[in-house]
Image: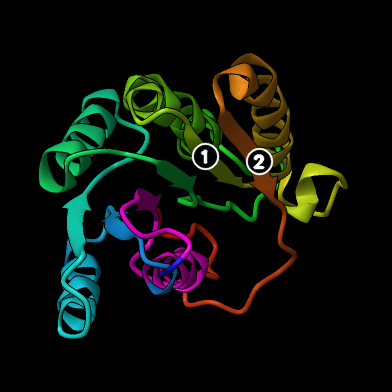
């Protein structure tokens, strides 16, 4: 028996890179997985590939900065697989710009994808996690949650916020057997590395 047999997970930004790696690991551990990404073409391709070896996977195209889209994602997971146990907030963007170079729209977009999404997914997932008797929320933050770095002030600020939001959620929901943790990777060689990275 696998560790996560019977569990259902949602992973955002999972059409490639770290998110896809997490989705594969969850499938290997026995979970059913909903892969979410804003990139519909890549998401459908990845799910078709995974379905060929494991039918416990589905795709839901989602802009994680959008309230109604995130609500739909969580509902999709519960309707498709009957429950929800794990949420992985992996989707993110990075803007390589100083504050002088960035527009207000640039700043707001980074904050919306990297921080608002970590507010929205628990907002809609928590009732289902309670119904399952508990669960886990994993937020992919960054080493930049702890240290400043050059030319990415919006990204660094967003990842610092992601870490503190994780701590706050952990305090609020730990007593309900809902674990909330942050994963803080360093620079990772993925297809997402660009001036404004695609998000899901």
Q: Residues within 10 Å of mark 1 (few under 14, many from 20)?
A: many
Cβ–Cβ under 8 Å for marks 1 and 2: yes
Q: CA distance from mark 1 to mark 2?
A: 8 Å
Task: State which quadrant residue 133 falls in.
Answer: top left
Q: Is residue 51 magenta?
A: no
Depth check: give the residue in front, 133 or 10: 133
Q: Is residue 50 left or right of residue 170?
A: left
Q: Residue at x 40, y 53 (%)?
A: 199
Task: State which quadrant residue 49 falls in.
Answer: bottom left
Which residues, given as a range, are shown in magenta? 3-27
Q: Secondary structure at mark 2?
A: strand
Q: Residues within 10 Å of mark 2 (few under 14, many from 20)?
A: some
Q: Is residue 88 left or right of residue 150?
A: left
Farthest right residue in view: 147
Depth check: give the residue in front, 26 or 149: 26
Colouring chosen for the image of the structure: rainbow
Would residue 178 be visible to someone looking at this image? Answer: yes
Q: Secondary structure at mark 1?
A: strand
Q: Is residue 19 magenta?
A: yes
Q: Residue at x 38, y 51 (%)?
A: 12
Residue position marked by numbered label 2 in the rendering? 181
Against 124, is 182 above or below?
A: below
Nearest to the eye among marks 1 and 2: give it: 1
Q: Is residue 138 left or right of residue 79?
A: right
Would residue 155 be visible to someone looking at this image? Answer: no
């Amino acid at each position: 028996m696998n560790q996560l047999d019977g569990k259902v997970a949602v992973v955002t930004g999972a059409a490639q890179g770290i998110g896809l790696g997490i989705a594969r690991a969850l499938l290997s551990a026995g979970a059913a997985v909903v892969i979410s990404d804003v990139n519909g073409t890549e998401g459908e391709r990845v799910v078709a590939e995974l379905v060929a070896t494991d039918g416990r996977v589905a795709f839901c195209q989602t802009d994680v900065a959008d309230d109604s889209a995130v609500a739909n994602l969580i509902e999709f997971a519960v309707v498709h697989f009957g429950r929800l146990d794990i949420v992985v907030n992996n989707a993110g963007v990075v803007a390589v710009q100083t504050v002088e170079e960035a527009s207000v729209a640039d700043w707001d977009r980074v904050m919306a994808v990297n921080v608002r999404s970590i507010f929205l997914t628990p907002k809609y997932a928590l009732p289902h996690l309670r119904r399952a008797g508990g669960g886990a929320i994993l937020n992919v933050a960054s080493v930049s949650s702890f240290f400043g770095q050059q030319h990415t002030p919006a990204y660094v600020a967003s990842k610092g916020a992601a870490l503190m939001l994780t701590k706050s959620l952990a305090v609020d929901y730990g007593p309900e057997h809902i674990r909330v943790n942050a994963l803080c990777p360093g620079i990772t060689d993925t297809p997402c590395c660009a001036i404004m990275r695609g998000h899901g």
